Image (cartoon, rainbow, N blue to C red):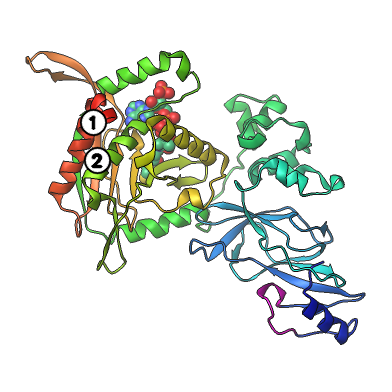
């Protein structure tokens, strides 16, 4: 157990069974009182997760009252408006109280669980009880735990998958995970159950007939959307649109797809647009700047951290590809695909979702020609692409030719960026996309 020497001797001198009001020594030891046989009850608080997160939603408990836990055992899964985080124990002890129900909001700094710890150890608590899902590999997690404890809760998967497994009383260790680091995906469970069609998937959770209106709290990523979009609409926006001929780019993608060495490469339009945007940002640094809340200072960012608006199972998320100016198109593609997988599995880290300096939204992946996007404050600009279409256009000899075209909308903060600068930025990007050799040469 985990009492500091000072605290422990204080407890001992107070004697068994005595109620003890404890002055704050370390934050984790507040709300501390003794129980019988040197056991003490600690209120284990939700620590600061960073990124200005003030509260989280409890998504799943991995323990119940009466369970014995050891340090690093997973206690619960919480979801902030930025990421999903697994909380692990700092203590060896017995769970005495869970402070929240599933889907309740837990504020940072308030007790999450009460744990009864044995009072005869003098070690300091392990420094962190919060573990971003991506930080530990499955192997490390398993190695942390005693053999007898290995069970369903140690296997990597998101809470909804764990719930599904529980519902069907499945032993997760028997299911082969095909996600990152062997993570078990919903598809793996369905495959295991031999239910693969969409129709069959729907049978798993028949939607209950609804009677009347339903009100539910706004949580998680949706809550983030409330915050960012409300801030966004305080900004005077202007929108600038143009069409981009992607015929040559499409041809290039088809050629690359046929190459044997690109067998494992998934190369959509996005990595090219991301690279072209970064090349254009080099020429117009004001587009890659941020502004402070009172609109008094502009900060020009050296890194091109490009956020990608992404339609994920949890709702709209904007994960960020960092330092695009240093990445090749293949590296951008790999990073994009990693983020798409994280979006699908619900495993973004806080780092994945922060520090964006410019954003791209490809709504065309879903469909639709035009879009009027809004800025992600404190960024100053964003571009959105519609779906490409084959349309008739005139060539240089006035012949009608079939071209693949998509519409691009650029939006900027008109307090800081003028229309001419945004137009020039988009024109550089357009030229590079329409003539991919210029993109590779960055001309
Ligand atoms: N026009 C035509 N086809 C497009 C397209 C476009 N603008 N964008 C993508 N496609 C095609 C791709 O080429 C791919 O087809 P292929 O496999 O035959 O090459 C297919 O659509 C699927 O693309 P996708 O796997 O979605 O990859 P992507 O890299 O193009 O896009 C995301 C990735 C994350 C941007 C996209 O999946 C997404 O979530 N878009 C929605 C963004 C959103 O919600 N914006 C609104 C913000 S309010």
- Residue 340 in the magenta stretch? The answer is no
- Residue 393 location in percent, x, y? 15, 20
- Which residue lies under the disc numbered 1? 432
Q: Residue at x 63, y 27 (%)?
A: 200
- The local crowd at label 2, few if under 14, some if 14 to 19, many if 20 or more residues have their Cα within 10 Å, is many
**Disc 1 residue crowd, few under 14, some 14–19, many 20+, Cα 10 Å:** many
Bounds of the magenta segment: 22-30
Find the residue positioned furthest to the left.
397
Point out the tag, 2 or 1, that comes first from the N-terminus.
2
Q: Quadrant of residue 383?
A: top left
Which of these two is toward me, 1 or 148?
1
Alpha carbon separation for disc pair 2 and 1: 9 Å
At a point 79% along the width and 36% down the height, the residue shown is 171
- Residue 409 found in image quarter: top left
- Which residue was labeled with disc 2? 280
| Up-down relation of residue 158 to residue 8 (above or below) | above
Query: What is the x, y in percent for residue 151?
Result: 80, 43
Mark 2 touching mark 1, by CB under 8 A?
yes
Q: Position of residue 59 (x, y in %)?
A: 63, 53
Give coordinates of residue 365: x percent, y percent.
Answer: 38, 32
**Secondary element at tag 1:** helix
For residue 353, above or below residue 123: above
Taking depth in this image into account, of 213 and 201 the one nearest to the observer is 201
Magenta-colored segment: predominant secondary structure: loop
239 to the left or right of 386: left
Q: Quadrant of ligand 1?
A: top left
């Amino acid at each position: 157990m985990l009492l500091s020497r000072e605290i422990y001797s204080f407890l001992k001198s107070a004697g068994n069974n005595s109620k003890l009001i404890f002055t704050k020594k370390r934050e984790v030891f507040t709300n501390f009182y003794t129980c019988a046989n040197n056991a003490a009850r600690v209120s284990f608080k939700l620590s600061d997760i960073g990124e200005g997160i003030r509260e989280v939603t409890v998504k799943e408990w991995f323990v119940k009252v009466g369970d014995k836990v050891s340090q690093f055992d997973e206690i619960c899964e919480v979801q902030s408006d930025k990421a999903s985080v697994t909380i692990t124990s700092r203590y060896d002890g017995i769970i005495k109280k869970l402070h929240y129900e599933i889907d309740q909001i837990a504020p940072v700094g308030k007790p999450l669980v009460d744990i009864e710890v044995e009072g005869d150890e003098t070690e300091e608590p392990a420094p962190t009880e919060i573990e971003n899902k991506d930080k530990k590999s499955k192997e490390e997690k398993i190695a942390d735990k005693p053999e007898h404890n290995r069970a369903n809760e140690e296997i990597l998967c998101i809470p909804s998958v764990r719930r599904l497994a529980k519902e069907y009383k499945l032993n997760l260790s028997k299911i082969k995970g095909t996600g990152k680091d062997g993570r078990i995906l919903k598809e793996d469970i369905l495959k295991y159950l031999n239910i693969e069609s969409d129709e069959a998937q729907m049978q798993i959770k028949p939607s209950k007939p609804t009677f009347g209106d339903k009100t539910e709290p706004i949580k998680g990523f949706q809550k983030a959307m409330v915050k960012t979009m409300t801030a966004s609409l305080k900004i005077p926006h202007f929108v600038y649109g143009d069409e981009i001929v992607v015929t040559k780019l499409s041809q290039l993608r088809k050629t690359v797809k046929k190459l044997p060495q690109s067998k494992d490469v998934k190369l959509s339009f996005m990595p090219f647009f991301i690279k072209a945007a970064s090349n254009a940002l080099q020429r117009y640094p004001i587009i890659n700047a941020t502004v402070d809340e009172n609109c008094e200072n502009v900060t020009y960012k050296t890194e091109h951290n490009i956020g990608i608006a992404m339609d994920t199972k949890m709702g709209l998320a904007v994960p960020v590809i960092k330092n695009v100016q240093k990445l090749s198109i293949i590296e951008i593609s790999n990073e994009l695909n990693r983020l798409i997988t994280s979006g699908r599995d619900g495993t973004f880290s806080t780092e994945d979702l922060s520090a964006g300096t410019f954003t791209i939204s490809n709504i065309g992946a879903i469909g639709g020609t035009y879009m009027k996007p809004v800025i992600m404050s404190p960024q100053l600009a964003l571009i959105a692409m519609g779906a490409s279409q084959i349309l008739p256009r005139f060539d240089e000899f006035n012949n009608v030719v079939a071209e693949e075209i998509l519409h691009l909308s650029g939006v900027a903060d008109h307090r800081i960026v003028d229309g001419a600068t945004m137009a020039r930025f988009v024109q550089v990007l357009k030229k590079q996309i329409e003539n991919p050799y210029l993109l590779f040469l960055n001309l």
